[in-house]
Amino acid sequence: MRLSSEQADRAGGVLLGQAIGDALGVPYEFGPPIELGTAAMIGGGLGPYAPGEWSDDTQMAVCIAQATAAGPFGQTPLDAVVAAFVRWAREGASDIGVQTSTVLRQAMDAPENLPAMQAAALDAAADGRAGNGALMRTSIVGLVALDDPERTAQAASDVARLTHAHHLCVESSILWSEAVRLAVVEGRLDLRAGVRLLGEDRRAFWQDAIGQAETQPPAIFGRNGFTVTALQAAWSAIHSTRHIAGPDHVEAALQAAIAIGHDTDTVAAIAGGLLGARYGVSGLKTDWTRRVHGWPGLRARDLVALALATAIGELPLDHRKSSMVTGGRPGLAVPHPDDPHVLLGTEADLARCADRGVTAVVSLSRVGADDIASTNVAPGKHVSVWLVDSDDPRKNAHLPWTIADAARTVSALREGGDRVLLHCVAAEHRTPSVALAYSALLGKSEGAAERIEAAVGHPVDGLLWVTAQGISASSGPARPCSAVNLDSEGDRSWT
């Protein structure tokens, strides 16, 4: 399926949204309910985990993504998923659910893993076990066939049955995977859409279960180790906060999911996958995305790449190319007029971070692995913002929010004592826009546009003027972005 820029943004947010929810929920796993709005990426939990580290929920989703990113799911044998699960259990599992552990142990001792795993899963189902271990990892499956709900349902069923063959586990996975697919393709949240993909005799049960989630407060779904209740808890958290507009809905819903208590990382991971599918990479807080990390040594940009590879059949450009620097841009690295410890720069400044005393980078354009390495900043101090340089408003789903969020991350880094390089390709549009948003955060909006234009050394006709009240388009004519290499920036359709 050919994806628009907005659809690609949403597809890229699926695994990342799951990881954010997971890492936020980790510290509170199997604890009592907590005060709404107090969850933070502080680490700990059952691992124990480092701050921002994801747990087995996202680890298993990564296993699936590693298989699905290699080619269309119909051509990817389930054996590849099983092999990834077994490898994870042997080498990297920080925590394994009881039902998953039971099934995997039998598969690990068998010469042919897939039949052994399927048989063990059937035994568990016969015993009535219907844990949430398949639902927790299913969001990525929603990307395997974006143009085909039936194929999506079949893939969700096949992957769920590897460890959780109970019909409730399979059905909940189908519902959630279809909701993810729909959110990516159409940009809307609808859990009921997948009910038609279930057997006729099962539809009334799930309509009733979803209805309970939509009419009852999240707090009543505390026994969420059960797959039905886990689905209800995640959907109730999303549905009950739907009045909060735009990407701020993500934080509100995740906080609601975690405040329920009990299996907090799993419920928040489930919710996060769907929220990422709806709001995309550009709608996820960059101060979160820079922090998340986990097995097998991945960070946010790797999760985005795996999700996009699953959706479009190939890794995105910034993972296929080790460097995205064109080599034709002069360096800039001029001090922000309202904070000299924020440097406004171009792609050429990435390799000069050490010379400038830079300890953190906020990239508003795509960068490759070599570009990241050249900065020599700590992994959690390099922030990548999904921001497409285009005059077409359809290319950026949440433009004012994304610019303001990038400015908030600059502020958070500065509060931590970092010297920050804020850059895009040529410092013509994105860098000045975020710089102006940062001035607004500092309470220095008056005259900031003129100061920033003087600092970067050229007029910025297409600048998005930022005020203390928000961001609006400049009243002046927008200059075409012809000077920017748009293909390297992602301003294209995704196939």
Image: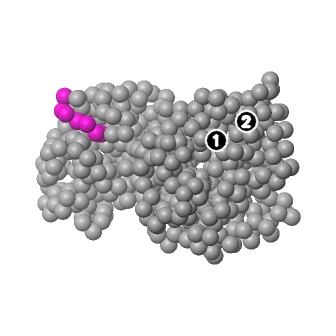
Front position in the image: 139 or 70: 139
Q: Quadrant of the N terminus?
A: top right
Q: Residue at x 65, y 33 (%)?
A: 89
Farthest residue, direction top? 111
Do residues under tags 1 and 2 come within 8 Å of each other at their CB atoms?
A: yes
Q: Residue 19, image x and y in percent?
A: 52, 47
Q: Residue 411, image x and y in percent?
A: 26, 52
Q: Residue 123, image x and y in percent?
A: 84, 44
Farthest residue, direction bottom? 215
Give the crowd class for mark 2: few <14, some 14-19, many >=20 residues within 10 Å.
many
Residue range highlighted in magenta = 355-361
Side of 480 relative to 296 (left or right): left
Judging by the rendered image, the residue that carries numbered circle 2 is: 104
In the rendered image, the vertical position of residue 273 relative to residue 75, given as above or below: below
> SS at mark 1?
loop
**Callout 1 amino acid:** Ile
Q: How is the image coloured?
A: one colour
Front position in the image: 267 or 97: 97
Judging by the rendered image, the residue that carries numbered circle 1 is: 96
Side of 453 relative to 494 (left or right): left
As for residue 426 lying within the magenta part, the answer is no
Q: Residue at x 67, y 34 (%)?
A: 85
Q: Residue at x 13, y 60 (%)?
A: 447
Give the crowd class for mark 1: few <14, some 14-19, many >=20 residues within 10 Å.
some
Q: Quadrant of the C terminus?
A: top right
Q: Residue 171, image x and y in percent?
A: 76, 56
Q: CA distance from mark 1 to mark 2?
A: 10 Å
Q: Residue at x 38, y 59 (%)?
A: 401
| Residue 132 visible somewhere in the drawing | yes
| Residue 386 visible somewhere in the drawing | no
